Amino acid sequence: MQWTIWRHIRLELPADWEMLQFSRNMVAGRCAFADRTQFRAELSWQAVSGPPDLERLASDYLAKRRLDGTIAGGVSPRRDSRGGDVPPTLARVGEWHGLRCHEGGLLTSRFSRYLGEEGCLIEFVLLWPQGLDASLEADILARVAAERPWPGGWRRWRAFGLDALAPGNLDLVECVAQPALARLGFADAREEHQVTFERLGMVPQWLRGSVRDWLARQVPSDLRDASEGRAEANGHQVEGLSGLRRGGALRRPTRYAAAAWLCPADGRLYRVAVTGLGAVEGGRPALDRLSCCEGKPLRG
Amino acid sequence: MLAARPARNAAAEAAREASGGVRIAVKRKRPRWHVPPLSWVVPIQPTRTVRLDPLGAQVWELCDGERTVEAIVDAFAAEHRLSFHEARVAVTGYLSQLVQRGALAIAIR
């Protein structure tokens, strides 16, 4: 099982289920996870003003689907892979209310709950191509929780191999998930404060020269008074670079700091770049915002 | 798709390059209109060259007609320390390009 933290929601899914679709929208959105062959889970969220009647939501959904014929009424004619009939049934698992039924030919668990800390309704859909695994379903649902803010208002994001702490007042404005490239970018509305986290793979294929040289090539063209630094942290040689740049719409001078390192454990190159936030001297504070090495606790 | 078995075009000739890449000469099908007297004045190269960089060559060499796409993805992921889906996106995209260029054929059993 591995943790994913997205939109301040923490979930734990089997290690081979990877996030393939995501939404950056904090008000309403979804992300979907797939195993090797097909989608297995979908988490969706919707900001609401108060706790909804979840039981009613589930029964309304069932009635609506029966009406449009997506779900067969009574006992489903299909059988799951273990040979048991799976009639559409309303169910409750802990704080989750929902139903299990066949949708689109697949046995589906569809549960929702109200996440008070985040003020949103979340729905979790699990697909069971090999038949219902009730214990995995219970495990997954039991471990979905709101990810509380860290001291100082930091918020943790964990996806695509990145495990990052971003200032809570910044929005996720960029997310890139491509082969050997994961990037999360956070910024405020005026783009005066920005944080970018990057994780790059297949490093021997493209990195020519040192990490320091590469980091120097990533800095914005308007950077002035740049100074370099180097730190050793947990067996990682961290290259740092800082200076001043003109950021935001008003082009006011703001601090810029970046750090990059090659993780010996997973062979990936990590980079953090921070613009406009306080306390970004040298590479170390930037490093504290991003973890590598699967299994080790987040620094900072 | 993951169960398909890509095989190299048996009629293509491959030569390894010093860079680690591979140059593949894929035979072209002669167009119907390419008959005398038109063929006397409009020459057509009998082969088309497909150049693969070292990474592409790695994928191409894994396509032996026995390995499934899934096995190729696994091998590529292990070699480059990528996750399964990272490697899947890269490899399947590349395989489809090679099929379009005639360097590979896909067998579905």
Image (tube, coloured by chain):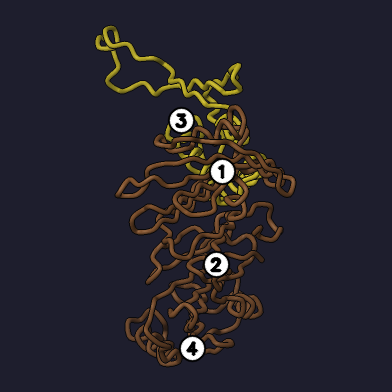
Chain colours: A brown, B yellow
Inspect this view and state whether residue B47 appears: yes
Residue type beneath disc 1: Leu
Picture coordinates of residue A235 (x, y %)? 74, 45
Chain label for disc 2: A
Q: Are marks 4 and 2 on the same chain?
A: yes
Position of B87 relative to B101 (above/below) = below
Instruction: Identify the mark at residue A75; answer none if there is no mark.
Output: 4
Q: Which residue, given by chain and number where applicable, does mark 2 sit on?
A: A152
Residue at 43% across, 74% down: A45
Q: Nearer the viewer, residue A132 or A258?
A: A258
Q: Which residue is mark 3?
A: B102
| CA distance for labels 4 and 2 | 53 Å
| Label 2 secondary element | loop
Q: Residues within 10 Å of mark 3 (few under 14, many from 20)?
A: many
Crowding at dot 1, Cα within 10 Å, few <14 / some 14-19 / many 20+, comes out as some
Tell us which disc is closer to us: 3 or 2: 2
Q: Secondary structure at mark 3?
A: loop
Chain for mark 3?
B
Q: CA distance from mark 4 to mark 1?
A: 50 Å
x and y percentages locating residue A219 in the rendered image: 47, 37
Q: In the image, which disc is placed on residue A200?
A: 1
What kind of element bears circle 4?
Answer: loop
Q: Which structural element holds mark 1?
A: strand
| Residue type marked 2 | Gly
Q: Residue furthest top?
A: B40
Instruction: Name the N-terminal-most of marks 4 and 2.
Output: 4
Question: Disc 3 versus disc 2: distance between alpha carbons?
Answer: 58 Å
Quadrant of the rendered image containing residue A200: top right
